[in-house]
Image (cartoon, helix red, strand yellow):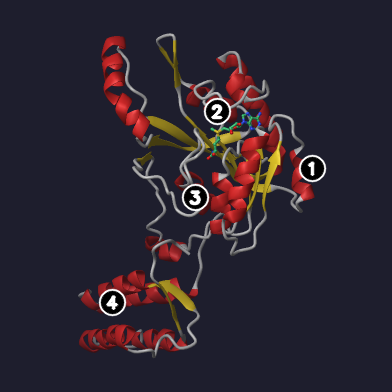
Amino acid sequence: MVKFMNIIKLNENFISEIDNLLKENNINILKNRIKEIKYKLTNSEEFFKNGVYEVSREWLIKNITHAEKSKSVERVKHYLKKIIKGLTEIKTTGINEINLNRWEEYTEIITDSLWIIDRRDNSGVHKAWYHGNFIPQIPRQMMLRYTKKYDLVVDTFLGSGTTLIECRRLGRHGIGIELNKEVAEKAKELINKEANPYNVITEVVVGDSREIDFEEILKKFGFKSCQLLIMHPPYHDIIKFSDDERDLSNAKTVKDFLKMFEEVVDNTYNILDDGRFLVLVIGDKYSNGAWIPLGFYCMDAVLKRGYKLKSIVVKNFEETKGKRNQKELWRYRALVGGFYVFKHEYIFIFQKVEK
Ligand SMILES: C[S@@+](CC[C@H](N)C(=O)[O-])C[C@H]1O[C@@H](n2cnc3c(N)ncnc32)[C@H](O)[C@@H]1O
């Protein structure tokens, strides 16, 4: 379920105990019995033997405490009913596994559009070896919001394989395309070192996302379509990833870069299910004293291709050691040149419009 949650499993005894309480109309009796239930939850095994109803301890205790402290019988019953519903019914949007009856439990999931993340997740095989990678929290958050277990995620610019490592952790199938063979090999090696508890497919394919036959690749691994597209292209020529002219970082002009990016968006359009999501992670650049809004140019390109915009997330760049040393220099340059120092990139979230 969700990271860092203390998950417990309750049994039928617990449900029937709460059900019985709902028949009681004396507030003092109600409160005393709730106190007893709370006591049993922490001091006995009674509600846990052969437990099947999964719930986080925090959520349960919070709602029982609300019930206990409520001043009217109606309010007490409101919380008791909420507990029963949260335990026995699942309400989702259909595109993820978030049980909306227990939405307060999902504290890991970010819902604000400004992300200040100071630390990358460096756990397990996630290493920051690849210059130009994204922090694992990005694909993780996107998969938690926009996919279910065993959905297929396609990353068109795989790089070091961050997305596929997260796929293994979250139980999503993943296929990643990477142009650079050596990078793809190294990514593959790392991905295979990550445990695969859900036994999902995580495949790395070497190729050019502008023209590779996605339908054929999906078919090869047993899929007809995907449920999430993740695109983290080069931010034009900010980092040169290779000498390959098919590499978007080698586009001669911004116009050429955009054309190449558009080709990738077009080439993936048919494999994404209607109503599903495309996530674009990109930053802007400077050229000849002008801010080039690559992010908005790319956003516009996607919007012209059958997608609607769901959100723009602005995320800080975390400070690497190297950048910290250059901070003073950039501040000076900014003051001289009349510009602001880049501190953010974008996560654009689009939904494929149903035809
Ligand atoms: C910004 S990086 C992606 C980093 C990745 N998200 C990670 O965490 O490692 C962009 C990647 O796109 C690759 N690339 C560039 N042009 C490509 C193309 N036409 N098809 C597929 N991959 C390409 C580059 O080699 C580079 O590894």
Kindly report which numbered mark, 2 or 4, lies closer to the viewer in this rendering.
2
Find out whether the residues at labels 1 and 2 contact each other: C-beta distance under 8 Å.
no
The residue carrying mark 4 is 76
Amino acid type shown at disc 4: Val
Three-letter amino acid code at the position of disc 1: Glu
Q: Earlier in the sequence, mark 4 or mark 1?
A: 4
Quarter-wise, where is residue 182 in the image? top right
Between marks 4 and 1, how big is the CA–CA gap?
Answer: 57 Å
Density class for disc 1 (Cα within 10 Å; few <14, some 14-19, many ≥20) is few
Relative image position of residue 291 (x, y in whole percent)? 42, 16
Badge 4 local density, few (<14 within 10 Å), some, or many (20+)?
many
The amino acid at mark 2 is Pro
Marks 4, 1: nearer the viewer: 1
> Quick one: SS at disc 2?
loop
Whether tag 3 and tag 2 are in contact, CB under 8 A, the answer is no
Q: Earlier in the sequence, mark 4 or mark 3?
A: 4
Q: Label 2, label 4: how many angstroms apart (C-alpha)?
A: 55 Å
Q: Is residue 280 visible?
A: yes
SS under mark 4: helix
Q: What secondary structure is marked by label 3?
A: helix
Q: In the rendered structure, find residue 140 and report the number of the disc placed on it.
A: 3
Closest to the camera, between mark 1 and mark 2, is: 2
First in sequence: mark 3 or mark 2?
3
Residue 152's spot in the image, x, y percent?
65, 51
Q: Which residue is mark 1?
A: 216
User: Between residues 58 and 244, which one lies in front from this camera angle?
Assistant: 244
Residue 234 is tagged as 2
Tell me which numbered mark, 3 or 1, is placed earlier along the sequence: 3
